[in-house]
Amino acid sequence: MPYRVLIVDDSLLVRGAVGEILSRIPDVQICGKSPNGLDAITQIQELKPDLVILDIEMPVMDGMTALRELRLRKIQVPILMLSVLTQHGARTTFEALELGALDFIPKPSAQAGMKLQEVEDLLIGKVTELMQTTGQAAFRAQSSPLSMEEKAQRKFELLVIGSSTGGPQALHKIFQQFKNPFPAPILIVQHMPPVFTAAFAERLGQISVVEAMEAREGMQLRPNCALVAPGNRHLGITAQNGQFTVTLSEEAPIQAHRPSIDFTLKSAVQHFGGRAAGLIMTGMGRDGVAGMQQLHASGGLTFSQDEASSVIFGMNRRAIEAGAVDLVLDLAEIPEVLAKYF
């Protein structure tokens, strides 16, 4: 069966460009194109697409209003947002994710701030990820060098979180549920373009008791402060004057990603060893698996988000397969379990 996609954008040029890019993916069928949100709702009900690619700013009915209307009518369909790479566009995009959109891609335009080939690769990658999410099997975590009872007696001093597709919504839910200030520093590596990481961090800080901001060179790691790796920079740790601080790197991408979860996890192991904890979440690919293996082998604490609550059961599944995970958790369980070990 073909994977049927509905493209919604007021620009005929954009609808054509997105359709041409998607036509290169085997088994993808463009089942319809729509110029606004109102028409899109009708087409969604009639065509029942597997995926909707939805622009935000449109006449008649914009993308945000369409999302709210779909939610009100309890119409469930996977939605990928087309987003403009600006600070305002980033904030609106995260509101869309909170309303139920799965993920976003930069809108192909002269102002996008990314090369057209990068946008094309992202679009093809995201749609391919979503096509491959069905039929994944569950796996059990394997034994750790230390028992969970032993780890429960240990004081963990750093939490590293890695996520990709579906990560912004999942992290929003986790941070919203923190009831008390978090007693350790948090480093977040979310696969995301520049500009969006700053707005994402700002949003996390607004909805949580935990302070959150985009990481900058030389920032000190401190309790109850989450630092988000900036787009197109690896996030590492260095020791300076007895304090742990942030170091940012433009080294080559790892597993095709910069920032890379592996990069940050390996830096955490180097400086914190078994006193660090890692959480690998929803996303496609293998980024974070090697880092989780190193952390697990060092006696650190390792968690993963489970299949049922993941948009993409990929990176977390592979970390579990590799025997690098102590506990597999539903998204709703994560804040409470983290509080238990910190």
Image (cartoon, rainbow, N blue to C red):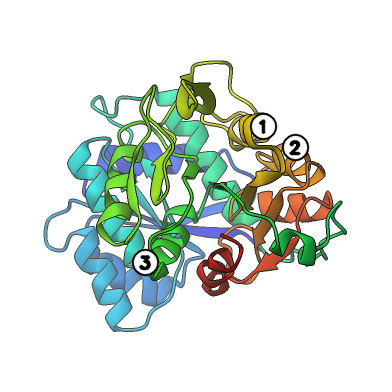
In the depicted structure, whether residue 329 falls above or below residue 303: below
Quarter of the image for the C terminus: give it. bottom right
Q: Position of residue 136 (x, y in %)?
A: 74, 63
Mark 2, other Cα within 10 Å: few <14 / some 14–19 / many ≥20: some
Q: In this view, does 159 lie to the left or right of 87?
A: right
Residue depth check, mark 1 versus mark 2: number of the one nearer the observer? 1
- Report x, y in % for residue 135: 74, 66
Q: Residue furthest top?
A: 251
Q: Residue at x 43, y 76 (%)?
A: 76
Quadrant where the image shows the N terminus: bottom right
- Secondary structure beneath dot 3 equals helix
Please name whichever residue, 105 or 176, is drawn nearer the observer in this view of the structure.
Answer: 176
Q: Which mark is residue 285?
A: none
> What amino acid is at disc 2?
Ala
The residue sitting at 41% across, 31% down in the picture is 231
Task: Give the vertical position of 152 relative to 21 (above or below).
Answer: below
Mark linked to residue 290: 2
Please state which amino acid type lies under the numbered disc 3.
Gln
> Position of 280 compared to 318: left or right?
left
Q: Point out the tag, 3 or 2, that comes first from the N-terminus.
A: 3
Q: On the image, which quarter does residue 143 sit in?
A: bottom right
Picture quadrant of residue 131: bottom right
Residue on which the image places disc 1: 266
Which of these two is toward me, 109 or 228?
A: 228
Q: Are marks 1 and 2 in contact (CB under 8 Å)?
A: yes
Position in image of residue 233 (x %, y %): 46, 25
Whether label 3 touches label 2, CB < 8 Å: no
Give the image location of residue 60, x and y in percent: 12, 62
Q: Dot 3 corresponds to which residue?
A: 176
**Amino acid type shown at disc 1:** Lys
